[in-house]
């Protein structure tokens, strides 16, 4: 296992009390993605340059304002990891040629949605990992093309209604396993996080920050606008995603996957589903028992396999 | 200074080497690949202190190039044809970061159908992007213009990326004697890269490529980029004069050849101008008052210099190695926009589309163009645009048309 022994984040009260990311962004109220970005930024700090792909978070930096104390580079929907490559390589060249000092160096952090991470940007991410790029990738996963109105993406879960999957069954496909795809590249680190579990998140970001090489984070991001729930439920839905086993919190390191939060007892998935308008058709006008149990079976099968391993 | 017999691709590589490019994101494509292979060889042998990264696409390559330039290193990269098209989102994206670098494009036609052979359709698709464009006619010019391009891109009043274009095959794979300047002399002409305030550093927060809300800030940034591109004209003149003073080779924004007293002018871009100059000499021997004008700068377009050199001419034949579907030759439209409404503009401006997909242009065809201008002037009627074909080629095209027609009508039965 890793040489990482003690975390400075043992209890909730160890978490940073300062808020580095400025307020007043145009993200929706209750945005689970913004919550995760807040928490991540508090740990990564201002010696960072965020390299962004098209999505909701692109609207964080709207001329002439930015909530970041450090730097920001918007690239395109597909090529944020390539932008990170250019920045990292340039900083390394400047350091090697002694044109900048060590303390002027920056951590390079890619920030994209699931649409970019699971789809259009997957080729550039795969290549950045394969080249061993020293960077952190943060994917806030709201399970759809949120910025364009929550169309189905490769991260949309089975049965969810989106603006392009509107019939009684919702989306017929399955969420792509990006964690496994990333881990198959054998990068330094891969982890799943969620803003509603700030301690688990903080430990993982702390760990990633201390490492070199490709470090990739997927943050499930409850999205009131796209998932259709009241913004005040955002953290609760995040908790339920973990307690029902829908969103496994885990990390990959040295060829090993470890689950970082395994409750002794699972809540049924419908506790998570029924809170969200995008799954309302599973309960109304009639209960779609078959589909609910199909979703439950899949979650159970996942954890059964975890137990066997 | 040494003299060597090298290809246009090798000349481009020499330009990057002498410019001491720090960084080269790369991706292979014919006919450009020899450039990155040559540079890779020098990097591997330790002759060049540059970091090369093989990207997975040109879209990523241009993203990395822009990002690295915006971080503060001198960047070189190269592509052709489909590669340029694949990168197009970022070709339009990076100039607004105002981070200078040099992209060599080895021009080649675009699909469909697929071709490896040269024309200018690829590079003209980047015309409105914010990249400045320099077009070369010889291998020597490729090397020299790469050096000039860095000065232009990095000029304080410009700060935009620059494309240096050379024609695939006709220049990329043609060996010509080239003077390779001494590194020390190049260092005097082109000092180390100064990123000015465009750079990512801890403690100096900077936001790049951000969103604007509303049309006013959008127009402001686009207008500023346009103004910077226009500043490229005086900046280029200044840099070219400097280059001539140091290396003795003149590169005005326009190359003019026997055009001062000419009545008829060929207007042509790229390496075919060398063939056209030969045709001009022969027509001069036959007593025709013919000259040639070749734009080296396509962006910024040298409007005023063109008006001056073409004022009072009787006719201009524009040779386009491209075809804008549903319109015609791009250079023809560009020149028309410069000349229209000028009191002493040439009354005849004829369009010839030639050299598509590697097609050669024979000397006789240049003579014929001048004849067309003559006849048009006598008849007082502008000639229609022409796609250049020899008799044999036309017969071949007619045959293909006939077969296609027959198959289409047969198919209906
Ligand atoms: C090349 C390209 N195609 C399409 C778009 C339009 N677009 C902007 S944001 C977006 C959705 C991105 O989805 P995701 O990565 O999940 O981020 P989210 O919007 O959910 O935050 C799309 C499709 C674009 N900006 N660029
Ligand atoms: S649409 Fe969803 S992800 Fe986007 S800002 Fe709103 S809540 Fe956040
Ligand atoms: Mg999304």
Image (tube, rainbow, N blue to C red):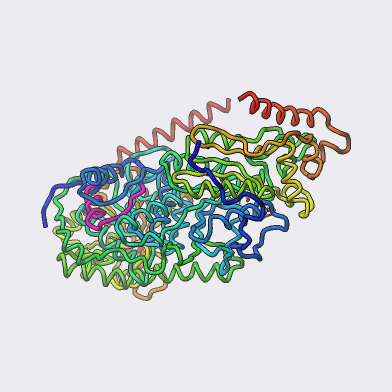
Q: Depth check: give the residue in front, B346 or B172.
A: B172
Check residue B79 for magenta coloring.
no
How many numbered marks appear?
0
Residue A50 placement (x, y as % from top left):
51, 56
User: Is A144 situated above or below B222?
Assistant: above
Residue A29 in view in this figure: yes
Residue at left 35%, top 67%? B347
Q: Quadrant of the N terminus of chain B?
A: bottom left
Q: Depth check: give the residue in front, A182 or A161.
A: A182
Residue B378 in view in this figure: no
B270 horizontally vs B220: left or right: left
A69 horizontally vs A31: left or right: left
Residue at the outermost left position:
B2
User: Is A184 situated above or below B32?
Assistant: above
Q: Which residues are magenta?
A: B10-25
Residue at left 74%, top 27%? A297
User: Is B155 situated above or below A251?
Assistant: below
Residue A287 placement (x, y as % from top left):
86, 33
Q: Depth check: give the residue in front, B345 or B196.
A: B196
Q: Depth check: give the residue in front, A113 or A97.
A: A97
Q: Quadrant of the C terminus of chain B?
A: top right
Residue A17 placement (x, y as % from top left):
63, 61
The image quadrant that residue A119 belongs to is: top right
């Amino acid at each position: 296992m890793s040489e990482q022994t003690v975390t400075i984040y043992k209890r909730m009260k160890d978490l940073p009390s300062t808020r580095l990311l400025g307020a007043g962004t145009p993200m929706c109220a209750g945005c689970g993605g913004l919550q995760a970005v807040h928490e991540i930024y508090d740990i990564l700090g201002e010696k960072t340059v965020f390299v962004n792909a098209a999505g909701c978070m692109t609207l964080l930096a709207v001329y002439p304002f930015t909530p970041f104390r450090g730097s920001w580079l918007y690239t395109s929907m597909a090529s944020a990891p390539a932008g990170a490559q250019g920045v990292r390589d340039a900083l390394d060249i400047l350091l090697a040629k002694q044109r900048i000092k060590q303390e002027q160096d920056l951590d390079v952090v890619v920030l994209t949605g699931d649409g970019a991470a699971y789809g259009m940007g997957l080729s550039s991410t795969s290549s950045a990992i394969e080249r061993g790029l020293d960077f952190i990738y943060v994917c806030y996963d709201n399970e759809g093309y949120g910025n364009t109105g929550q169309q189905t993406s490769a991260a949309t879960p089975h049965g969810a209604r989106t603006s392009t999957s509107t019939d009684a069954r919702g989306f017929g496909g399955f969420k792509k396993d990006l964690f496994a795809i990333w881990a198959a590249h054998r990068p330094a680190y891969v982890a799943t996080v969620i803003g509603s579990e700030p301690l688990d998140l903080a430990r993982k970001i702390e760990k990633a920050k201390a490492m070199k090489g490709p470090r990739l984070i997927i943050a499930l991001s409850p999205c009131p606008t796209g998932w259709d729930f009241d913004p005040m439920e955002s953290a609760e839905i995040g908790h339920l995603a973990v307690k029902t086993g829908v969103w496994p919190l885990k990390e990959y390191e040295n060829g090993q996957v470890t689950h970082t939060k395994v409750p002794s007892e699972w809540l049924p998935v419908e506790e998570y589903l029924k809170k969200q308008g995008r799954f309302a058709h599973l309960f109304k006008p009639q209960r779609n028992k078959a589909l609910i149990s199909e979703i439950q079976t899949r979650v159970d099968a996942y954890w059964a396999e975890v137990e066997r391993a | 200074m040494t003299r060597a017999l090298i290809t246009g691709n090798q000349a481009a590589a020499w330009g990057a080497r002498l410019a001491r490019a720090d960084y080269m994101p790369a991706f292979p494509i014919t006919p450009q690949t020899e450039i990155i292979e040559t540079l890779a060889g020098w990097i591997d042998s330790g002759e060049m202190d540059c970091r090369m990264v093989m990207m997975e696409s040109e879209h990523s390559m241009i993203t990395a190039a822009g990002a690295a330039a915006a971080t503060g290193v001198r960047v070189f990269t190269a592509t052709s044809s489909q590669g340029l098209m694949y990168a197009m989102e970022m070709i339009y994206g990076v100039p607004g970061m105002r981070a200078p670098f040099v992209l060599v494009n080895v021009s080649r036609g675009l699909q469909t159908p697929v071709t490896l052979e040269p024309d200018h359709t690829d590079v003209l698709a980047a015309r409105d992007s914010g990249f400045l464009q320099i077009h070369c006619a010889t291998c020597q010019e490729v090397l020299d213009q790469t050096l000039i391009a860095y000065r232009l891109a990095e000029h304080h009043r410009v700060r935009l990326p620059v494309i240096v274009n050379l024609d695939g095959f006709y220049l990329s794979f043609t060996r010509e004697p080239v003077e390779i300047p001494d590194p020390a002399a190049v260092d005097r002409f082109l000092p180390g890269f100064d990123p000015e305030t465009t750079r990512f550093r801890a403690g100096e927060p900077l936001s790049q490529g951000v969103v604007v809300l509303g049309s006013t800030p959008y127009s402001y940034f686009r207008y500023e980029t346009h103004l910077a591109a226009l500043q490229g004209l005086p900046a280029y003149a200044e840099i070219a004069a400097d280059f001539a003073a140091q290396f003795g080779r003149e590169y005005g924004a326009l190359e003019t050849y026997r055009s001062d007293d000419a009545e008829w002018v060929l207007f042509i871009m790229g390496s075919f101008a060398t063939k056209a100059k030969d045709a001009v000499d022969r027509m001069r021997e036959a007593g025709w008052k013919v000259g040639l004008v070749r734009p080296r700068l396509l962006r910024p377009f040298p409007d005023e210099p063109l008006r001056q050199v073409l004022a009072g001419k009787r006719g201009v034949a524009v040779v386009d190695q491209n075809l804008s579907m549903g319109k015609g030759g791009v250079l023809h439209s560009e020149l028309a926009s410069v000349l229209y409404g000028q009191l002493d503009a040439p009354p005849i401006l004829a369009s010839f589309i030639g050299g598509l997909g590697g097609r050669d242009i024979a000397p006789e065809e240049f003579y014929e163009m001048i004849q067309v201008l003559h006849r048009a002037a006598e008849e007082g009627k502008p000639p229609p645009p022409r796609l250049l074909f020899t008799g044999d080629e036309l017969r071949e095209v007619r045959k293909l048309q006939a077969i296609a027609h027959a198959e289409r009508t047969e198919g209906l039965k």
